[in-house]
Image (cartoon, coloured by chain):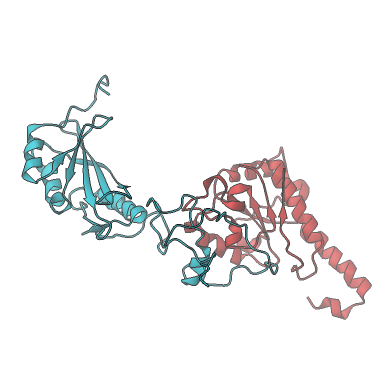
Chain colours: A cyan, B red
């Protein structure tokens, strides 16, 4: 990265350090990609975001992406990750905001960077993190009535055959009897359940044997 | 159709044959091209492979004018209700070819967003191998479907045991 003619310069400036100490955030250890990172408390994140965008010495005017990481064994469980780019100073910054599982909510930065709108919808869709203040927090990739947040680590990799749960819950898909001309006793192609469904993700096709 | 009751058996059995012959040689496919399988499906209709040799080259882009749906590609849960609606709009008798492993079982892309086989939402008549299947395989699927249609009665509701193509 260092040899690139337009490689971003370090974001570890005095202005950033001042802001970090003012808001009680902390610097993250150097990442392999060389992008400076800070860990921010979610209560102060919205105001910090405004400062990052508006302060003359910082001017992080472009929100590159918003994503999240699920750490099943950590507290807080989720990390919402923002990448900011200052076009004025050619600097990159990574911001992480911890979000606990019990109250999976994070302030929305749509009013600061309009780009965040769809990105935050995607994070909500995939991880179930809600963004307080988002103008239109709907699922963006999965169907509106999809019951899970599939990028959580406890969601099975091969997915859940939710045709059954769709039918049970009267969702869009299963509003009518679907398997019209199927001969008696013939089931659709079986899903390998040898490893079982993780807790909370059973689709009802394999009822628990509690006799 | 009720015709079976009005004519002697020898006559209606020939009528059944005639209808089946007509049906199997004038399949009008509804191309549900969802991913790369659709490219092979297009090649199948092209001059080199020429599906018209089997009477199935009249692709209709309205489900109301089609009687066999070729599900060519990966069906997602978000698309599923739309695919089902298209299937419901096709007039009877109708058939479904699941083209490729994605349509048959979710295949390579079986994950949270993909329907693990279109038989979850509609009855399938022929499952096809391949990722994507060569045009030969699709032609074979059409031929297998033709042999199946041959055995159907006038109501088009004869046994619907699916045919699974294997390599």
Q: Nearer the viewer, residue B152 or A206?
A: A206
- Give x and y (percent) for residue A175: 51, 72
| x and y percentages locating residue B167 in the rendered image | 72, 42
**x%, y% of residue B38?**
59, 46
Visible in this render: residue A202? yes
Relative to B85, say whether A23 is above or below. Answer: above
> In screen coordinates, is A202 left or right of A126?
right
**Which residue does the image show at 85% across and 80% down from the upper left?**
B5
Query: How many circles with numbers are drawn on the protein?
Result: 0
Q: Please tell me which residue is depicted at 24% across the width and 24% down the height of the picture.
A: A6
- Of B69 and A171, which appears nearest the observer? A171
Q: Quadrant of the N terminus of chain A?
A: top left
| Quarter location, residue B132 | top right
Residue in front for this viewpoint, A42 or A66: A42
In this rendering, the answer to whether A17 lies above or below A203 is above
Work out whether residue B32 can be spotted: no
Using the rendered view, name the quadrant where residue A82 is placed.
Answer: top left
Which residue ends up furthest to the top in the rendered image?
A: A3
Q: Residue at x 11, y 50 (%)?
A: A47
Nearer to us in this view, A35 or A63: A35
Asked whether, in this view, residue B75 is left or right of residue A12, the answer is right
């Amino acid at each position: 990265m260092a040899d690139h003619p337009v490689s971003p310069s370090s974001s570890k400036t005095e202005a950033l350090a001042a802001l970090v100490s003012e808001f009680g955030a902390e610097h993250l250890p150097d990442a392999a990609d060389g992008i400076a990172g800070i860990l921010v408390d979610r209560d102060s994140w919205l105001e910090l975001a405004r400062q990052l965008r508006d302060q003359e010495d910082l001017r992080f005017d472009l929100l590159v992406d918003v994503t999240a990481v699920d750490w099943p064994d950590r507290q807080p469980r989720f990390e919402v990750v923002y990448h900011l780019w200052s076009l004025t100073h050619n600097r990159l910054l990574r911001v992480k905001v911890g979000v606990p599982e019990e109250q999976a909510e994070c302030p929305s930065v749509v009013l600061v960077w309009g780009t965040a709108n769809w990105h935050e919808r995607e994070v909500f869709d995939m991880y179930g993190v809600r963004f307080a203040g988002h103008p239109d927090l709907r699922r963006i990739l999965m169907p509106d009535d999809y019951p899970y947040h599939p990028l959580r680590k406890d969601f099975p990799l091969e997915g859940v055959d939710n045709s059954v749960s769709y039918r049970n819950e009267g969702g869009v898909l299963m509003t009518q009897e679907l398997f019209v001309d199927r001969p008696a006793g013939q089931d659709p192609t079986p899903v390998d359940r040898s490893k079982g469904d993780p807790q909370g993700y059973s689709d009802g096709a394999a009822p628990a044997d509690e006799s | 159709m009720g015709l079976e009751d009005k004519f002697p058996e020898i006559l209606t059995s020939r009528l059944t044959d005639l209808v089946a012959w007509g049906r199997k040689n004038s399949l009008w496919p509804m191309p549900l091209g969802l991913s790369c399988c659709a490219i092979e499906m297009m090649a199948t209709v092209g001059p080199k492979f020429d599906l018209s040799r089997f009477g199935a080259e009249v692709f209709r882009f309205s489900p109301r004018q089609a009687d066999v749906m070729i599900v060519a590609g990966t069906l997602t849960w978000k698309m599923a209700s739309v695919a089902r609606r298209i299937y419901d709009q096709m007039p009877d008798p109708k058939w479904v070819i699941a083209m490729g492993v994605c349509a048959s079982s979710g295949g390579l892309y079986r994950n949270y967003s993909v329907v693990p086989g279109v038989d979850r939402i509609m009855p399938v008549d022929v499952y096809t191998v391949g990722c994507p299947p060569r045009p030969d395989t699709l032609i074979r699927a059409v031929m297998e479907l033709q042999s199946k249609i041959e055995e159907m009665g006038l109501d088009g509701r004869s046994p619907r045991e699916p045919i699974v193509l294997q390599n």
